[in-house]
Image: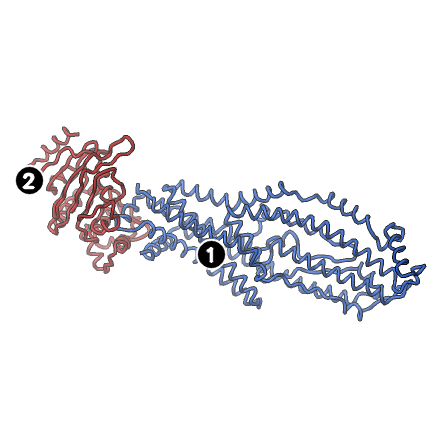
Chain colours: A red, B blue
Amino acid sequence: MISAQQLTKHYGDKVALDKLSLDIAPGEIFCLLGQNGAGKTTTINCFLGFVQPTSGTARINGLDVAAHPLESKKHLAYLPEVVMLYPNLTGLENLDYFSRLAGFRHTKDELHALLTTAGLPENEGVRRVSTYSKGMRQKVGIAIALAKQAKALFLDEPTSGLDPKASNDFSGLLARLKDKKVAILMATHDIFRAKDVANRMGIMKDGQLVNVLDNNSNTLQAREIEELYLQTI
Amino acid sequence: MILEIARQEFRGMLREGRFRTAALLLSALFLLSLIGAYDYYASLKQQHDEAARTMRSQWDNQKEKNPHSAAHYGTFVFKPIYPLSYFDRGVDAFTGNTLFLEAHRSNQATFRGAEDQGEFARLGALTPAFVLGMLMPLFIIVLGFGAAAAERENGNLRLLLAQGVRPATLFMGKSLGLWAAVLLLALPFFVAGAVGLFVANAGAEHWLRYSCTLLLYLAYFGSFIHLTLLISAWAGRQNVALVGALGVWVFACLIVPKAAVNMAKQMYPAPNWQAYHTALKEDLENGVDGHDSQNIFYKKLEEETLKKYGVDSIQHLPFNWWGFMLQKGEEHETYVFQKHKQKLLDVYEKQQAVHRAAAVVSPYMLTNSLSQRLVGTDVNTYFDFLAAAERYRIQLVGELNADMTNNIKFGEWDDRGKEFFSKNAHFDYQPPTLGSLLGDLSKPAGAMLLWLIVSGLAAAFFFNRLKPL
């Protein structure tokens, strides 16, 4: 569903991505770990078409993103690290607007249900986003991603603004999406959360995918992963 | 999807303090300018109509006198006040609308205003044209400078593009949203203008001119909407976008008009008052003076005329020699005045050509000059009025001198009364119709249209190039 072959990006002399290859099947969660600047966000940017790879291809549902910038967007949903939204609109209006832009017209009930699923307390949807905390905005962002019912989901530090309870709820949500055969690529610093949800974990350094750990058997301990991570970077 | 974006943009704006403050301020200024304009138009129109009637009745009922004395007595004519002149006072503020006509001289002190076209001083008048031309772009900039830059900076752009929005669609949605805000303010104002025309019982010509003026301003607003969005997308950062957009405003609305006027004056300086009058006086003395029988040209003409009619003294000529000479003097004076005025007009025309060339880089100048032309307060309409008044003066003085030459015996100074004076030619000035201006208007109008289209395409181009942060 999500696939990269020899994905490379140069900025002048600097190598941001170096021959990165990965395949994420439907119903699989792949977590990208790594320092800031290791290339996690560049990888996601390539899949979103925001960055043109110097060489290699990024595919979503078999579509080359560079060749089909709009068509490929239909199959993906995206949750940015910072969800700002429009402060003068309510959470519900924001969700409605972004859904309409993606071509979906949800009823009010559906929109409320989406916000609840994303973990926004009831009745908060009708308040203006300018009164929201970062975590609440993040939840509207999650609802926006859910509303698109995409087969590929890209998450950039999705839990960075969430409190532990919300973060835990979010893990549950990802598990349900996994059951719905959504392929998920998640960039994160949160090793424990990654271990909790991921099928596989990749550690990135200087644009390269250095280590890929299989987490399916659930035999890895968080401590081991952390040690490996520290050794890698 | 364009409509969705426009709706969102407009809805967000309406809920914003920035929009409300700016809209309130602009509406208040609109209202003030309308009240001021109505006041100006109504009082001036009434004064003019009254004065024009009074002047004619004074002419008709003047004390019995010799026709040439009546020519010295003179009369006033008035440039008609257009119903649309409320919109933009143009050069009227400098030139005035009143002209004194008399024998022997073509009054021209009122030319001075032409030199001041586009001067800073004009910023002072709170006319509808000022609010639409100067302030509306500021309103557009304040509302629109963040359209692309803010979305980029706060990260919404990533989300928008990830939802599958085309950059071109985003541009069109944003510009439509800005249009909604602009029309919300401008439409009531446009309607008020139409109501004013209706009340003034304006004819088809004025409705046509008004429609063209509105279309012109819509193209102007559109250009500024495009320019603001273009700069927002090009800059990608709000502070840079704001400074850039304001810079364009300062350039187009202040610097280019001022520079054009200065440049035109430098390149084609008009003669100063003293030089003009010295040259005029010299030429006047170099010809027949109908009042001075010692003048050598007078004597020469006398000899020639006596010879031509085969008589030995002016008493025996078949017409009144004095009336004849007054008309000959008048013709010489008219010729000299026209020669010098034409020189002046040529200089002004060259200056205007510089203005026209400079206007190409400033949508404000294009709009301003077209708008003045359309509402009939521009310098060309004024010159047209002056020319008509001069033709009338020549005709009137000619009629009076002809009466003396042909109907009054030499050596007598018969008086004429109401019966004669009321039959003298009337001044009936018809300003040029819109149809006759089309040739002149097509170039700047085309340039304006080009601004609208090119700025739109450029904005779409920069939206396409927009990279999320």
Dividing the picture into quadrants, the one containing residue A83 is: top left
Query: Is B321 or A91 nearer to us in this picture?
Result: B321
| Residue at mark 1: chain | B
Amino acid type indicated by mark 2:
Asn
Label 2's element? loop
Q: Residue at x 35, y 55 (%)?
A: B6
Residue sitting nearer the eye, A217 or B215: B215
Q: Secondary structure at mark 1?
A: helix
Report which residue position mark 1 lands on.
B218
Q: Nearer the viewer, mark 2 or mark 1?
A: 1
Q: Tell me residue A108's x, y (percent).
A: 24, 59
Asked if A105 appears above or below B161 in the picture, the reply is below
Specify the farthest residue to the top.
Answer: A231
| Residue that badge 2 annotates | A218
The answer to which of A94 and B68 lies nearer the viewer is B68
Q: Are marks 2 and 1 on the same chain?
A: no
Residue type at mark 1: give it.
Answer: Leu
Foreground pick, B369 / A191: B369
Say whether residue A115 is visible. Answer: no
Q: Looking at the picture, how far across and down is residue A154, in whole percent?
A: 20, 45
Q: Is residue B121 left or right of residue B173?
A: right
Left or right of B17: which side holds B359?
right
| Mark 1 crowdedness (10 Å alpha carbons): few <14, some 14-19, many ≥20 | some
